[in-house]
Image: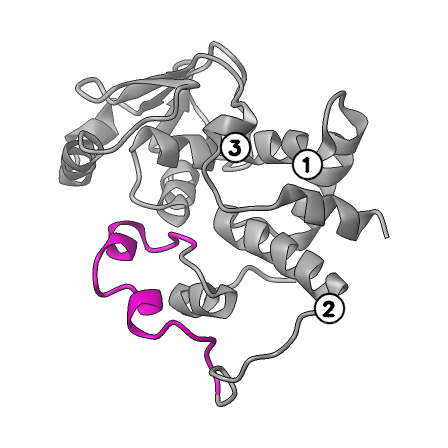
Amino acid sequence: MARYTGPVCRLCRREGMKLYLKGDRCYTEKCAVERRNYAPGEKGQTRRKMTEYGLQLQEKQRARRIYGVLERQFRRYFDIAERQKGITGENLLRLLERRLDNVVYRLGFAASRAMARQLVRHGHITVNGRRVSIPSYLVRIGDEIAVAEKSKEMPLFAELAEAAAHKTTPPWLEVDLERMRGRVAAFPSREDIDIPIKEHLIVELYSR
């Protein structure tokens, strides 16, 4: 299955909630969910009763769309989470949060996860001083994530740093916006992950 390349605002409307896929636009009145808070299509405004399976599938799709992960990737993360100690659902969310593209977004070096993924692929991000172009790279405690030295001269990063100054950085990350670098201080706890996901439904779906 190829990555979705259509209008991402349709995904938010389909889920009936903001997935914050368009960055700062999602916080304005231009947000599609604010203007048309119903599913796209002719029958978008009709209500339908969801089955138990439908609710579980919807939650999985919602998580996939928020993090921009394909189905096979997502299933692989679940298999890893299931083998780890602790609660499977929370382990899954921690793995997704540790993706390099997500960390770049959380640090404020990108306006959205999609932008973060593109910046990583184009070689604008370093981990411990070395360029890493793999968005799915899983960061570890103590890793230092930074904007590459030559890339810091781009006007884009000056604008992003200014916008990030007004946002809250998750407690498991440390950031220095002047130097455009951050550090992974700890792995995220469930309380640190603010996405509206009921992970137990995803576990129930894959356990059927």
Q: What element carries label 2?
A: loop
Going from N to C along the chain, the mark reached first, 1 or 3, is 1
Q: Residue at 33% across / 33% down in the picture?
A: 124
As for residue 37 lying within the magenta part, the answer is yes
Residue that appears at 73% across and 68% down: 51
Q: Nearer the viewer, mark 2 or mark 3?
A: 2
The three-letter code of the residue at mark 2 reads: Thr
- Counting from the top left corner in percent of width and height, residue 102 is at 45, 36
Specify the quadrant of the image occupied by residue 119.
Answer: top left
Q: Which amino acid does label 1 sit on?
A: Gly
Residue that numbered label 1 is attached to: 89
Answer yes or no: do the residues labelled 2 and 3 have beta carbons within 8 Å? Answer: no
Magenta region: which residues? 19-41
Q: What residue type is labelled 3?
A: Glu
List the residue tagged with mark 3: 97
In the picture provided, is 98 more to the left or to the right than 58? left
- How dense is the environment of label 1, judged by Cα within 10 Å: few (below 14), some, or many (20 and up)? many
Quadrant location, the N terminus: bottom right
